[in-house]
Image (cartoon, helix red, strand yellow):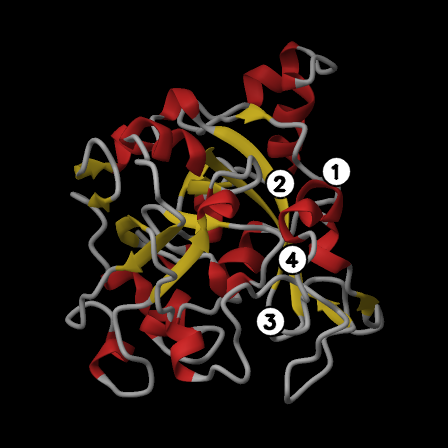
């Protein structure tokens, strides 16, 4: 599904809804709320930074299955069929099988997570996702003893994703996390942004979001989740191991071989805004730094 700007709730109404949920708005805001809007429970894990607009979030994307330009996903993603959709959960789990998106992330369980996003290309956004903790899905599947990693595979559908018909990346797209990273409360499976179902160009119908890592770690349009005891191969690490490590934590002290990671450009900030300093772990260090205690993060980049 490809959305138009006119399809989404105006930002002012969305902000009023947030105020209402917090208990500080009145009945007038309730009357202005669209009946079809998705809602998620507010989370203390959300940042209080102002989100980028829906238009910015859905028109400046990396989703290389649709093309390598930032506007290609919005231009071509409407060809992707997202209903029906199921995700195969397999490997070291007690209850393997194919699960519908509505089973993995029912609307009644959605949480609102307003997260900072930092791309490895040194640009950033703030995005209001709706989703569920990945840990809730893995716990329901029943992770077996001995499991150490969780692998994710995106959809392979060349008839609907034009760049998959060419060379460059060994499709389908693959990513992975350590099990403790996957079970961290910040890690979610997202099915919507703002209050609308996930737009195709952002990874519909279900995608991973790991806010302390560079954006490419968050696999889109997931069709398979595999729990394993061996570190999985991932797409970018396989393609360019000198440039893209397995961990891909946001780290301003480790430059990409071809550019600095010390600063970033915030999308929507304006031409005169300048660059801002990048924060370690994208600003989520208080929550995740302990996951990497004792590790050399220049070697494990």
Q: Nearer the viewer, residue 255 or 131?
A: 255
Q: Nearer the viewer, residue 129 or 194?
A: 129
- Residue 120, disc: 3
Q: Please provide percent x and percent y for residue 282.
A: 70, 56
Q: Nearer the viewer, residue 141 or 87?
A: 141
Mark 1 touches mark 2? (CB < 8 Å): yes
Could you give the CA–CA distance between mark 3 and mark 1, rounded to whole angstroms? 23 Å
Label 3: which secondary element: loop
Could you give the CA–CA distance between mark 1 and mark 2, rounded to whole angstroms? 8 Å
Residue under the image location 63 percent in, 18 percent down: 21
- Residue 125, disc: 4
Give the mark, 1 or 4, whose residue is nearer the N terminus: 1
Could you give the CA–CA distance between mark 4 and mark 2, rounded to whole angstroms? 10 Å
Could you give the CA–CA distance between mark 1 and mark 4, rounded to whole angstroms? 13 Å
Mark 4 touches mark 2? (CB < 8 Å): no
- In the displayed structure, 176 sits above or below 95; it is below
State the residue position of label 1: 48
- Residue 114, disc: 2
Mark 2 touches mark 3? (CB < 8 Å): no
- In the displayed structure, 185 sits above or below 254; it is above
């Amino acid at each position: 599904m490809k959305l138009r700007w006119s399809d989404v709730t105006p930002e002012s109404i969305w902000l009023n809804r947030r105020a209402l949920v917090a208990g500080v708005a009145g009945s007038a805001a309730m009357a202005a709320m669209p009946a079809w809007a998705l809602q998620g429970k507010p989370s203390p894990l959300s940042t209080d930074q102002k989100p980028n607009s829906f238009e910015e979030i859905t028109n400046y994307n990396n989703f290389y299955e649709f093309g390598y330009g930032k506007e290609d996903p919005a231009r071509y993603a409407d060809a992707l069929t997202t209903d029906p959709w199921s995700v195969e959960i397999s490997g070291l789990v007690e209850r393997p099988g194919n699960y519908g998106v509505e089973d993995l992330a029912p609307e009644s369980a959605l949480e609102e997570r307003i997260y900072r996003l930092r791309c490895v290309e040194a640009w950033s956004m703030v995005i209001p996702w709706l989703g569920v903790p990945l840990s809730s899905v893995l716990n329901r599947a029943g992770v077996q003893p001995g499991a150490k990693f969780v692998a994710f595979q995106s959809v392979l559908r060349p008839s609907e994703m034009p760049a998959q018909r060419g060379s460059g990346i060994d499709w389908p797209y693959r990513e992975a996390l350590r099990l403790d990273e996957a079970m961290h409360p910040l890690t979610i499976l997202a099915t919507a942004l703002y209050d609308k179902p996930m737009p195709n160009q952002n990874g519909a119908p279900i995608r991973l979001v790991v806010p302390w890592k560079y954006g490419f770690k968050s696999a889109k349009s997931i069709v398979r989740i595999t729990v394993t005891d061996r570190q999985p191969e991932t797409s970018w690490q396989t393609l360019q191991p000198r440039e893209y490590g397995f961990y891909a934590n946001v780290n301003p002290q480790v430059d990409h071989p071809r550019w600095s990671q010390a600063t970033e450009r915030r999308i929507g900030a304006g031409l005169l805004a300048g660059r801002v300093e990048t924060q370690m772990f994208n600003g989520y260090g208080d929550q995740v730094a302990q996951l990497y205690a004792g590790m050399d993060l220049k070697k494990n980049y």
